[in-house]
């Protein structure tokens, strides 16, 4: 296996263009596990850890541009207030060691339906910035990025450069069900983001379909039925949970049954919406 170690972004793009089968690694927390268990053995590894710009983040006009190499630990420490949904999800990723190495860029590259960062990226209207040497930069909305189980819209010669996430304009929450309390792959997960000025809600469902996905019918229902000046009616909460559960298309596997996942998505949707709505009304009253 060849090991490529560029030190600049231009070198990284050139290496990927010349060897499209080269597997990029940032933290390596997913890729190296697969290699160690002989699940996947690429012809070359493209180590991006020495490309310094990938470890930087910036903000412009209220949108945070997070380099693909920024680890979860920094998102928690430096962006927890601005991007609370993504920070909450980042806290559930593995152990402290994994959070110091693992990155949202790597999570996107793996495109696993169970990736913890996917639901808040969907709920938060994130956009993925990718680039190739020959075709330049593309901006892909998160809801268009996921194509199938571990398949994404990324082309063979493209690399993930950054993620663009608007600052939270209202309360955001992330919830995850696992077989234990920590260091666990999600049985299923759910994220919600409120947009009070637009009178809408964003959602994200994880590990309950071939790809991470939004609950579009539930979002439309809440936009039509919610009174943004009052507590949510119990019937509205219940129906929202049902629609989120209906948006999932899970399977039975070693971590849980399809029926359990549907039930859990409904419960998490009701709970996170209730938490977010109470926060929203509390801020209005303050």
Image: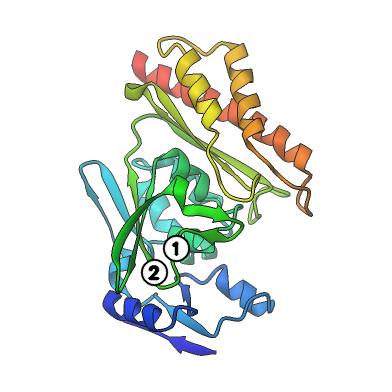
Residue found at x 30% / y 53%:
65
The quadrant holding residue 184 is bottom right
Residue at the far front in the pictured view: 135
Residue 171 x, y percent position in the rendering:
42, 30
Instruction: Tell me if mark 1 has few (under 14), some (14-19) or many (20+) residues whose alpha carbon lies within 10 angstroms of its own.
Output: many
Q: Judge left or right: residue 71 versus residue 233.
A: left
Whether tag 2 and tag 1 are in contact, CB under 8 A, the answer is: yes
- Viewer-proximal residue among 193 and 102: 193
Whether residue 91 is visible to the viewer of this picture, yes or no, is yes
What percent of the width, then of the height, locates residue 80?
A: 39, 45
Q: Is residue 176 visible?
A: no
What residue appears at the point 47 percent right and 16 percent down from the top-left corner?
224
Q: Secondary structure at mark 1?
A: loop
Residue 221 drawn above or below residue 138: above
Q: Residue 200: x and y, percent?
A: 41, 25
Is 28 or 214 nearer to us in this picture? Answer: 214
Element on which disc 2 rests: loop
Residue 84: where, in percent of width, then height? 42, 40
Q: Is residue 186 left or right of residue 101?
A: right
- Relative to 42, is 167 on the left or the right? left
**Quadrant location of the N terminus in the rendered image:** bottom right
Count of picture labels: 2
Question: Splitting the image into 4 quarters, where does residue 166 fall?
Answer: top left
The residue labelled by disc 2 is: 158
Q: Residue at position x 65%, y 35% from top?
A: 265
Residue 168: assigned label:
none
Q: Which residue is mark 1?
A: 154
**Outermost residue toward the bottom?**
2
**Residue that appears at 34% across and 41% down:** 82
Q: How is the image coloured?
A: rainbow
């Amino acid at each position: 296996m060849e090991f490529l170690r560029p030190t600049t972004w231009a070198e990284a793009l050139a290496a990927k263009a010349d060897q499209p089968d080269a597997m990029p690694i940032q933290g390596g927390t997913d890729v190296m596990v697969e290699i160690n268990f002989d699940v996947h053995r690429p012809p070359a590894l493209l180590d991006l850890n020495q490309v310094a710009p990938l470890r930087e983040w910036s903000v412009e006009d209220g949108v945070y541009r997070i380099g693909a190499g920024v680890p979860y630990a920094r998102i928690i420490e430096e962006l927890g207030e601005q991007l609370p949904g993504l920070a909450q999800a980042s806290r559930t990723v593995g152990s402290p060691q994994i959070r110091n190495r693992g990155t949202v860029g790597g999570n996107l590259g793996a495109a696993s339906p169970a990736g913890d960062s996917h639901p808040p990226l969907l709920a938060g209207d994130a956009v993925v910035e990718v680039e190739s040497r020959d075709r330049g930069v593309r901006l892909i909305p998160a809801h268009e990025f996921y194509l199938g189980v571990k398949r994404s819209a990324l082309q063979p010669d493209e690399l993930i450069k950054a993620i663009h996430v608007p600052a939270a304009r209202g309360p955001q929450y992330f919830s995850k069900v696992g077989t234990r309390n920590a260091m666990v792959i999600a049985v299923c997960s759910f994220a919600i983001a409120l947009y009070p000025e637009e009178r809408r809600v964003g959602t994200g469902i994880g590990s309950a379909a071939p790809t991470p996905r939004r609950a579009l019918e539930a979002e439309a229902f809440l936009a039509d039925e919610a009174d943004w000046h009052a507590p949510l009616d119990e019937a509205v909460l219940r129906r929202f949970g049902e629609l989120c559960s209906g948006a999932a298309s899970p399977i039975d596997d070693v971590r849980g049954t399809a029926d359990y996942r549907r039930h859990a998505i409904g419960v998490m949707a009701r709970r996170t919406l209730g938490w977010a709505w109470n926060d929203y009304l509390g801020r209005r009253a303050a």
